[in-house]
Amino acid sequence: MENLNLIDYFSEFKELKSINREILIKVLEDVFKNMLEKHFGSSENFDIIINPDKGDFEIWRNREVVADEDFSDPTHQISLSAAKLIDTDYEEGEEVTDEVKLESFGRRAILSLRQNLSSKINELEKDNLYSKYKDRVGQIVTGEVYQVWKREILIIDDEGNELILPKNEQIPADYYRKGDHVKAVVIRVEMRNGSPLVVLSRTSSVFLERLFELEVPEIFDGLITIRKIVRMPGERAKVAVESYDDRVDPVGACVGMKGSRIHGIVRELHNENIDVINFTNNTNLYITRALSPARINRIEITEAQKRAEIYLDPDQVSKAIGKSGLNIKLAIQLTGYEIDVYRDVNEEDEDDVKLEEFGDEIEQWIIDQFKSVGLDTAKSVLLLSVEELEKRTDLEIETIRDVLQVLKEEFE
Protein backbone atom coordinates (compact mmCIF):
# COMPACT_ATOMS: atom_id res chain seq x y z
CA MET A 1 0.00 0.00 0.00
CA GLU A 2 2.86 2.41 0.84
CA ASN A 3 4.45 1.56 -2.50
CA LEU A 4 1.19 2.29 -4.33
CA ASN A 5 0.66 5.55 -2.44
CA LEU A 6 4.12 6.76 -3.37
CA ILE A 7 3.52 5.93 -7.05
CA ASP A 8 0.26 7.87 -6.98
CA TYR A 9 2.05 10.70 -5.23
CA PHE A 10 4.68 11.38 -7.88
CA SER A 11 2.23 10.62 -10.70
CA GLU A 12 0.06 13.46 -9.40
CA PHE A 13 3.03 15.79 -9.53
CA LYS A 14 3.63 14.95 -13.17
CA GLU A 15 0.03 15.70 -14.11
CA LEU A 16 -0.47 18.81 -12.03
CA LYS A 17 2.96 20.42 -12.21
CA SER A 18 3.81 19.72 -15.87
CA ILE A 19 7.28 18.38 -15.13
CA ASN A 20 8.74 16.68 -18.18
CA ARG A 21 9.56 12.98 -18.15
CA GLU A 22 13.37 13.18 -18.16
CA ILE A 23 13.54 15.67 -15.31
CA LEU A 24 11.03 13.68 -13.23
CA ILE A 25 13.09 10.49 -13.66
CA LYS A 26 16.28 12.28 -12.65
CA VAL A 27 14.63 13.73 -9.52
CA LEU A 28 13.18 10.35 -8.53
CA GLU A 29 16.51 8.59 -9.08
CA ASP A 30 18.30 11.10 -6.88
CA VAL A 31 15.71 10.73 -4.12
CA PHE A 32 15.85 6.92 -4.20
CA LYS A 33 19.66 6.92 -4.26
CA ASN A 34 19.66 9.17 -1.23
CA MET A 35 17.39 6.71 0.60
CA LEU A 36 19.55 3.73 -0.41
CA GLU A 37 22.72 5.47 0.77
CA LYS A 38 21.15 6.17 4.14
CA HIS A 39 19.91 2.59 4.50
CA PHE A 40 22.78 0.60 2.97
CA GLY A 41 25.67 3.08 3.04
CA SER A 42 26.00 3.01 -0.76
CA SER A 43 23.84 3.05 -3.89
CA GLU A 44 26.50 2.00 -6.40
CA ASN A 45 25.32 -1.60 -6.80
CA PHE A 46 21.61 -0.75 -7.11
CA ASP A 47 19.62 -0.30 -10.31
CA ILE A 48 16.60 1.98 -10.11
CA ILE A 49 14.03 1.49 -12.88
CA ILE A 50 11.37 4.19 -13.10
CA ASN A 51 8.44 4.47 -15.48
CA PRO A 52 6.65 7.78 -14.71
CA ASP A 53 4.18 7.25 -17.57
CA LYS A 54 2.78 4.13 -15.92
CA GLY A 55 3.49 5.40 -12.43
CA ASP A 56 5.62 2.49 -11.18
CA PHE A 57 9.23 1.81 -10.22
CA GLU A 58 11.54 -1.04 -9.21
CA ILE A 59 14.75 -1.25 -7.16
CA TRP A 60 17.21 -4.08 -7.95
CA ARG A 61 20.31 -4.94 -5.92
CA ASN A 62 23.42 -6.57 -7.48
CA ARG A 63 25.67 -8.62 -5.15
CA GLU A 64 28.67 -10.89 -5.69
CA VAL A 65 28.51 -14.55 -4.56
CA VAL A 66 31.32 -15.32 -2.08
CA ALA A 67 32.20 -18.35 0.07
CA ASP A 68 30.41 -18.41 3.41
CA GLU A 69 33.64 -17.92 5.33
CA ASP A 70 34.56 -14.86 3.17
CA PHE A 71 31.17 -13.14 3.57
CA SER A 72 31.68 -9.73 5.26
CA ASP A 73 29.75 -7.06 3.29
CA PRO A 74 25.98 -7.70 3.10
CA THR A 75 25.48 -4.67 0.83
CA HIS A 76 27.83 -5.83 -1.94
CA GLN A 77 28.14 -9.57 -1.17
CA ILE A 78 25.91 -12.62 -0.70
CA SER A 79 27.08 -15.88 0.82
CA LEU A 80 27.11 -18.97 -1.40
CA SER A 81 24.63 -20.78 0.81
CA ALA A 82 22.21 -17.85 0.67
CA ALA A 83 22.62 -17.61 -3.12
CA LYS A 84 21.80 -21.30 -3.55
CA LEU A 85 18.53 -20.74 -1.71
CA ILE A 86 17.61 -18.44 -4.61
CA ASP A 87 18.99 -20.70 -7.33
CA THR A 88 21.04 -23.87 -6.82
CA ASP A 89 23.13 -23.15 -9.94
CA TYR A 90 24.90 -20.13 -8.43
CA GLU A 91 28.69 -20.41 -8.01
CA GLU A 92 31.30 -18.23 -6.34
CA GLY A 93 32.18 -15.06 -8.32
CA GLU A 94 28.81 -14.83 -10.01
CA GLU A 95 26.42 -11.92 -9.53
CA VAL A 96 23.01 -12.22 -7.90
CA THR A 97 20.33 -9.66 -8.74
CA ASP A 98 17.26 -9.46 -6.52
CA GLU A 99 14.45 -6.94 -6.15
CA VAL A 100 14.30 -4.76 -3.06
CA LYS A 101 10.73 -4.03 -2.03
CA LEU A 102 10.00 -0.51 -0.87
CA GLU A 103 8.14 -1.70 2.22
CA SER A 104 11.34 -3.34 3.46
CA PHE A 105 12.72 0.13 4.24
CA GLY A 106 10.04 0.77 6.84
CA ARG A 107 7.26 3.31 7.17
CA ARG A 108 9.49 6.07 8.50
CA ALA A 109 11.90 5.82 5.54
CA ILE A 110 9.00 5.89 3.07
CA LEU A 111 7.51 9.01 4.70
CA SER A 112 10.93 10.64 4.58
CA LEU A 113 11.17 9.68 0.92
CA ARG A 114 7.83 11.34 0.18
CA GLN A 115 8.86 14.53 1.96
CA ASN A 116 12.18 14.57 0.13
CA LEU A 117 10.41 14.00 -3.19
CA SER A 118 7.91 16.77 -2.50
CA SER A 119 10.68 19.21 -1.58
CA LYS A 120 12.73 18.37 -4.69
CA ILE A 121 9.82 18.68 -7.09
CA ASN A 122 8.64 21.94 -5.52
CA GLU A 123 12.12 23.40 -5.92
CA LEU A 124 12.21 22.17 -9.50
CA GLU A 125 8.80 23.64 -10.22
CA LYS A 126 9.89 27.02 -8.82
CA ASP A 127 12.99 27.00 -11.01
CA ASN A 128 10.93 26.02 -14.07
CA LEU A 129 8.37 28.77 -13.43
CA TYR A 130 11.10 31.38 -12.91
CA SER A 131 12.98 30.36 -16.07
CA LYS A 132 9.82 30.14 -18.18
CA TYR A 133 8.50 33.59 -17.29
CA LYS A 134 11.92 35.25 -17.12
CA ASP A 135 12.12 34.59 -20.87
CA ARG A 136 8.57 35.93 -21.35
CA VAL A 137 9.07 39.38 -19.83
CA GLY A 138 7.49 41.85 -22.26
CA GLN A 139 5.10 39.26 -23.70
CA ILE A 140 1.32 39.12 -23.36
CA VAL A 141 -0.19 36.29 -21.33
CA THR A 142 -3.81 35.33 -20.75
CA GLY A 143 -5.12 33.81 -17.54
CA GLU A 144 -8.19 33.31 -15.40
CA VAL A 145 -8.95 35.29 -12.26
CA TYR A 146 -8.72 32.94 -9.29
CA GLN A 147 -8.92 35.36 -6.39
CA VAL A 148 -9.49 39.09 -6.03
CA TRP A 149 -7.80 40.95 -3.18
CA LYS A 150 -7.75 44.61 -2.27
CA ARG A 151 -4.21 45.27 -3.53
CA GLU A 152 -3.82 42.63 -6.23
CA ILE A 153 -5.46 39.87 -8.25
CA LEU A 154 -4.31 36.25 -8.36
CA ILE A 155 -4.41 34.89 -11.91
CA ILE A 156 -3.92 31.27 -12.99
CA ASP A 157 -2.43 30.56 -16.42
CA ASP A 158 -3.31 27.58 -18.62
CA GLU A 159 -0.69 25.42 -16.85
CA GLY A 160 -1.90 26.26 -13.35
CA ASN A 161 0.90 28.72 -12.55
CA GLU A 162 0.08 31.62 -10.23
CA LEU A 163 0.54 35.17 -11.58
CA ILE A 164 -0.04 38.49 -9.83
CA LEU A 165 -1.72 41.62 -11.24
CA PRO A 166 -1.20 44.43 -8.68
CA LYS A 167 -3.81 47.15 -8.27
CA ASN A 168 -1.41 49.85 -9.48
CA GLU A 169 -0.85 47.86 -12.70
CA GLN A 170 -4.57 47.76 -13.47
CA ILE A 171 -6.44 50.28 -15.60
CA PRO A 172 -8.75 52.38 -13.36
CA ALA A 173 -11.84 50.98 -15.13
CA ASP A 174 -10.72 47.35 -14.69
CA TYR A 175 -13.17 45.30 -12.65
CA TYR A 176 -12.74 41.56 -12.30
CA ARG A 177 -14.53 38.68 -10.66
CA LYS A 178 -13.43 35.10 -10.15
CA GLY A 179 -13.48 33.21 -13.43
CA ASP A 180 -12.96 36.28 -15.66
CA HIS A 181 -10.27 36.08 -18.33
CA VAL A 182 -7.49 38.67 -18.20
CA LYS A 183 -4.98 39.73 -20.81
CA ALA A 184 -1.81 41.47 -19.55
CA VAL A 185 1.92 41.76 -20.17
CA VAL A 186 4.67 40.25 -18.00
CA ILE A 187 6.69 43.17 -16.64
CA ARG A 188 8.99 41.42 -14.17
CA VAL A 189 9.83 38.11 -12.53
CA GLU A 190 11.56 38.07 -9.17
CA MET A 191 12.33 35.64 -6.36
CA ARG A 192 10.54 36.49 -3.13
CA ASN A 193 11.11 34.33 -0.04
CA GLY A 194 12.50 31.58 -2.23
CA SER A 195 9.47 31.52 -4.56
CA PRO A 196 9.13 33.09 -8.02
CA LEU A 197 6.76 36.05 -8.28
CA VAL A 198 5.43 36.78 -11.78
CA VAL A 199 4.05 40.32 -11.98
CA LEU A 200 1.69 41.39 -14.78
CA SER A 201 0.66 44.84 -15.98
CA ARG A 202 -2.11 46.41 -18.04
CA THR A 203 -0.87 49.98 -17.55
CA SER A 204 2.58 49.50 -19.08
CA SER A 205 3.33 51.06 -22.47
CA VAL A 206 4.70 47.65 -23.46
CA PHE A 207 1.19 46.20 -23.09
CA LEU A 208 -0.18 48.73 -25.59
CA GLU A 209 2.73 48.02 -27.93
CA ARG A 210 2.03 44.26 -27.84
CA LEU A 211 -1.67 44.89 -28.53
CA PHE A 212 -0.70 46.85 -31.65
CA GLU A 213 1.52 43.97 -32.75
CA LEU A 214 -1.43 41.58 -32.41
CA GLU A 215 -3.86 43.82 -34.29
CA VAL A 216 -1.56 45.29 -36.97
CA PRO A 217 0.26 42.70 -39.13
CA GLU A 218 2.54 45.38 -40.60
CA ILE A 219 3.97 46.05 -37.13
CA PHE A 220 4.42 42.35 -36.40
CA ASP A 221 6.16 41.87 -39.79
CA GLY A 222 8.46 44.86 -39.22
CA LEU A 223 7.14 47.09 -42.03
CA ILE A 224 6.01 49.59 -39.40
CA THR A 225 7.85 50.31 -36.18
CA ILE A 226 6.56 51.93 -33.02
CA ARG A 227 9.05 54.66 -32.11
CA LYS A 228 7.51 55.64 -28.76
CA ILE A 229 4.40 55.20 -26.64
CA VAL A 230 3.24 57.39 -23.77
CA ARG A 231 -0.05 56.89 -22.00
CA MET A 232 -2.26 57.73 -19.08
CA PRO A 233 -3.86 54.29 -18.60
CA GLY A 234 -7.58 54.27 -19.25
CA GLU A 235 -7.57 57.93 -20.30
CA ARG A 236 -5.35 58.70 -23.26
CA ALA A 237 -2.31 57.49 -25.15
CA LYS A 238 -0.08 58.78 -27.92
CA VAL A 239 1.72 56.37 -30.24
CA ALA A 240 4.42 57.54 -32.67
CA VAL A 241 4.82 55.16 -35.62
CA GLU A 242 7.13 55.07 -38.63
CA SER A 243 7.06 53.09 -41.86
CA TYR A 244 10.11 51.66 -43.60
CA ASP A 245 8.11 51.33 -46.81
CA ASP A 246 7.00 54.56 -48.50
CA ARG A 247 4.00 52.70 -49.92
CA VAL A 248 2.66 51.95 -46.42
CA ASP A 249 0.83 54.66 -44.50
CA PRO A 250 1.75 53.86 -40.87
CA VAL A 251 -1.11 55.78 -39.27
CA GLY A 252 -3.72 54.38 -41.66
CA ALA A 253 -2.42 50.84 -41.18
CA CYS A 254 -2.63 51.15 -37.39
CA VAL A 255 -6.12 52.62 -37.41
CA GLY A 256 -7.49 50.29 -40.06
CA MET A 257 -10.48 50.62 -42.35
CA LYS A 258 -13.07 52.69 -40.46
CA GLY A 259 -11.02 52.18 -37.30
CA SER A 260 -11.40 48.39 -37.43
CA ARG A 261 -7.93 47.66 -36.05
CA ILE A 262 -7.66 50.27 -33.34
CA HIS A 263 -11.21 49.65 -32.05
CA GLY A 264 -10.18 46.25 -30.71
CA ILE A 265 -7.32 47.83 -28.78
CA VAL A 266 -9.53 50.63 -27.45
CA ARG A 267 -12.08 48.08 -26.19
CA GLU A 268 -9.39 46.08 -24.43
CA LEU A 269 -8.22 49.28 -22.69
CA HIS A 270 -11.76 50.34 -21.67
CA ASN A 271 -12.13 53.13 -24.26
CA GLU A 272 -8.70 54.66 -23.76
CA ASN A 273 -8.36 57.46 -26.32
CA ILE A 274 -5.41 56.58 -28.59
CA ASP A 275 -3.73 59.14 -30.86
CA VAL A 276 -1.58 57.53 -33.56
CA ILE A 277 0.85 60.02 -35.12
CA ASN A 278 3.46 59.77 -37.84
CA PHE A 279 6.99 60.05 -36.43
CA THR A 280 9.34 62.57 -38.03
CA ASN A 281 12.80 63.97 -37.31
CA ASN A 282 11.42 67.45 -38.06
CA THR A 283 11.01 68.74 -34.51
CA ASN A 284 8.47 71.44 -35.37
CA LEU A 285 6.29 69.01 -37.28
CA TYR A 286 6.64 66.33 -34.61
CA ILE A 287 5.51 68.70 -31.84
CA THR A 288 2.64 69.91 -34.02
CA ARG A 289 1.46 66.33 -34.54
CA ALA A 290 1.93 65.51 -30.86
CA LEU A 291 -0.43 68.35 -29.86
CA SER A 292 -3.18 67.17 -32.20
CA PRO A 293 -6.08 67.99 -32.49
CA ALA A 294 -5.05 71.60 -31.74
CA ARG A 295 -4.13 73.80 -34.74
CA ILE A 296 -0.84 75.56 -34.08
CA ASN A 297 0.05 78.93 -35.67
CA ARG A 298 3.79 78.88 -35.01
CA ILE A 299 6.48 77.26 -32.86
CA GLU A 300 9.66 78.78 -31.42
CA ILE A 301 12.18 76.20 -30.26
CA THR A 302 15.13 76.70 -27.91
CA GLU A 303 17.14 73.58 -28.70
CA ALA A 304 19.73 74.07 -25.95
CA GLN A 305 17.04 73.96 -23.27
CA LYS A 306 14.80 71.46 -25.13
CA ARG A 307 11.94 73.94 -24.80
CA ALA A 308 9.23 74.87 -27.30
CA GLU A 309 6.93 77.90 -27.25
CA ILE A 310 3.64 77.20 -28.99
CA TYR A 311 1.43 80.00 -30.29
CA LEU A 312 -2.16 79.35 -31.25
CA ASP A 313 -5.57 80.99 -31.45
CA PRO A 314 -7.48 81.34 -28.17
CA ASP A 315 -10.08 78.76 -29.19
CA GLN A 316 -7.31 76.18 -29.76
CA VAL A 317 -5.66 76.53 -26.34
CA SER A 318 -8.05 74.16 -24.56
CA LYS A 319 -7.54 71.55 -27.30
CA ALA A 320 -3.76 71.76 -26.93
CA ILE A 321 -3.97 71.48 -23.14
CA GLY A 322 -6.61 68.79 -23.11
CA LYS A 323 -8.79 67.57 -20.26
CA SER A 324 -6.91 68.01 -16.96
CA GLY A 325 -3.84 69.04 -19.00
CA LEU A 326 -3.51 65.48 -20.30
CA ASN A 327 -2.88 66.26 -23.97
CA ILE A 328 0.05 68.57 -23.34
CA LYS A 329 1.53 66.31 -20.65
CA LEU A 330 1.60 63.38 -23.07
CA ALA A 331 2.97 65.58 -25.86
CA ILE A 332 5.83 66.65 -23.57
CA GLN A 333 6.61 63.02 -22.76
CA LEU A 334 6.39 61.96 -26.40
CA THR A 335 8.60 64.71 -27.86
CA GLY A 336 11.00 65.20 -24.96
CA TYR A 337 10.50 68.98 -25.12
CA GLU A 338 9.10 71.25 -22.42
CA ILE A 339 6.14 72.93 -24.11
CA ASP A 340 4.82 76.39 -23.17
CA VAL A 341 1.47 77.36 -24.70
CA TYR A 342 0.72 80.99 -25.64
CA ARG A 343 -2.34 82.60 -27.15
CA ASP A 344 -1.90 84.65 -30.28
CA VAL A 345 -3.43 88.01 -29.31
CA ASN A 346 -5.57 89.69 -32.00
CA GLU A 347 -6.51 93.34 -32.25
CA GLU A 348 -9.55 92.91 -30.01
CA ASP A 349 -7.31 91.70 -27.20
CA GLU A 350 -4.81 94.55 -27.30
CA ASP A 351 -6.01 95.73 -23.90
CA ASP A 352 -5.22 92.31 -22.40
CA VAL A 353 -2.28 92.12 -19.97
CA LYS A 354 0.43 89.48 -19.73
CA LEU A 355 0.50 87.65 -16.39
CA GLU A 356 4.22 88.39 -16.13
CA GLU A 357 3.32 92.05 -15.55
CA PHE A 358 1.65 91.12 -12.25
CA GLY A 359 4.94 89.89 -10.79
CA ASP A 360 4.77 92.41 -7.92
CA GLU A 361 1.38 91.13 -6.74
CA ILE A 362 1.40 87.46 -7.76
CA GLU A 363 4.24 85.07 -6.90
CA GLN A 364 6.22 83.79 -9.88
CA TRP A 365 5.52 80.08 -9.18
CA ILE A 366 1.77 80.81 -9.33
CA ILE A 367 2.20 82.61 -12.66
CA ASP A 368 4.18 79.62 -13.95
CA GLN A 369 1.33 77.32 -12.95
CA PHE A 370 -1.11 79.27 -15.11
CA LYS A 371 1.33 79.54 -18.00
CA SER A 372 1.96 75.76 -17.95
CA VAL A 373 -1.68 75.22 -18.93
CA GLY A 374 -1.75 77.93 -21.61
CA LEU A 375 -3.12 80.77 -19.48
CA ASP A 376 -0.56 83.51 -20.04
CA THR A 377 -2.78 86.61 -19.98
CA ALA A 378 -5.17 88.14 -17.48
CA LYS A 379 -8.24 87.74 -19.67
CA SER A 380 -7.50 84.10 -20.44
CA VAL A 381 -7.61 83.43 -16.68
CA LEU A 382 -10.70 85.55 -16.03
CA LEU A 383 -12.65 83.72 -18.74
CA LEU A 384 -12.58 80.52 -16.69
CA SER A 385 -14.44 79.67 -13.49
CA VAL A 386 -12.73 78.96 -10.17
CA GLU A 387 -13.70 75.29 -10.46
CA GLU A 388 -12.24 74.99 -13.97
CA LEU A 389 -9.01 76.71 -12.91
CA GLU A 390 -8.68 74.32 -9.97
CA LYS A 391 -9.03 71.34 -12.34
CA ARG A 392 -6.41 72.64 -14.76
CA THR A 393 -3.81 73.75 -12.22
CA ASP A 394 -2.40 72.37 -8.98
CA LEU A 395 -3.40 75.53 -7.12
CA GLU A 396 -5.69 75.75 -4.11
CA ILE A 397 -9.06 77.50 -4.41
CA GLU A 398 -8.06 80.33 -2.06
CA THR A 399 -4.95 81.07 -4.13
CA ILE A 400 -7.04 81.11 -7.33
CA ARG A 401 -9.56 83.50 -5.80
CA ASP A 402 -6.78 85.86 -4.69
CA VAL A 403 -5.34 85.88 -8.22
CA LEU A 404 -8.75 86.53 -9.78
CA GLN A 405 -9.26 89.48 -7.43
CA VAL A 406 -5.94 91.02 -8.46
CA LEU A 407 -6.73 90.57 -12.16
CA LYS A 408 -10.26 91.99 -11.85
CA GLU A 409 -8.95 95.10 -10.12
CA GLU A 410 -6.63 95.71 -13.09
CA PHE A 411 -9.57 96.02 -15.50
CA GLU A 412 -11.82 97.89 -13.10
Image: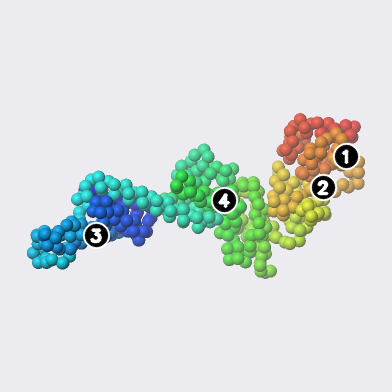
Instruction: Tell me the CA gap for discs 1 and 2.
Output: 15 Å
Q: Is residue 293 visible?
A: no
Is 241 above or below relative to 353? below
Q: Amino acid at mark 3?
A: Phe
Instruction: Tell me the CA gap for discs 1 and 4.
Output: 49 Å
In the drawing, does residue 34 fall left or right of residue 279? left
Residue at image coords 83%, 35% = 362
Residue at image coords 74%, 32% = 397
Q: Earlier in the sequence, mark 4 or mark 3?
A: 3
Q: Split into 4 quadrants, where in the image is the C terminus?
A: top right
The residue closer to the viewer here, 389 or 10, is 10
Q: Which residue is mark 4?
A: 268
- State which mark lies toward you, 2 or 3: 3
The 10 Å Cα crowd at callout 2, few under 14, some 14 to 19, many 20 or more, is many
Residue at image coords 61%, 52% = 205
Q: Which residue is mark 3?
A: 46
Q: Secondary structure at mark 4?
A: helix
Residue at image coords 91%, 41% = 351
Q: Which mark is residue 342?
A: 2
Q: Amino acid at mark 4?
A: Glu
Q: Earlier in the sequence, mark 1 or mark 2?
A: 2
The 10 Å Cα crowd at callout 4, few under 14, some 14 to 19, many 20 or more, is some
Q: Is residue 389 visible?
A: yes
Residues tagged 1 and 2 counted as in contact (Cβ below 8 A): no
Q: Earlier in the sequence, mark 2 or mark 3?
A: 3
Instruction: Tell me the CA gap for discs 4 and 2.
Output: 36 Å
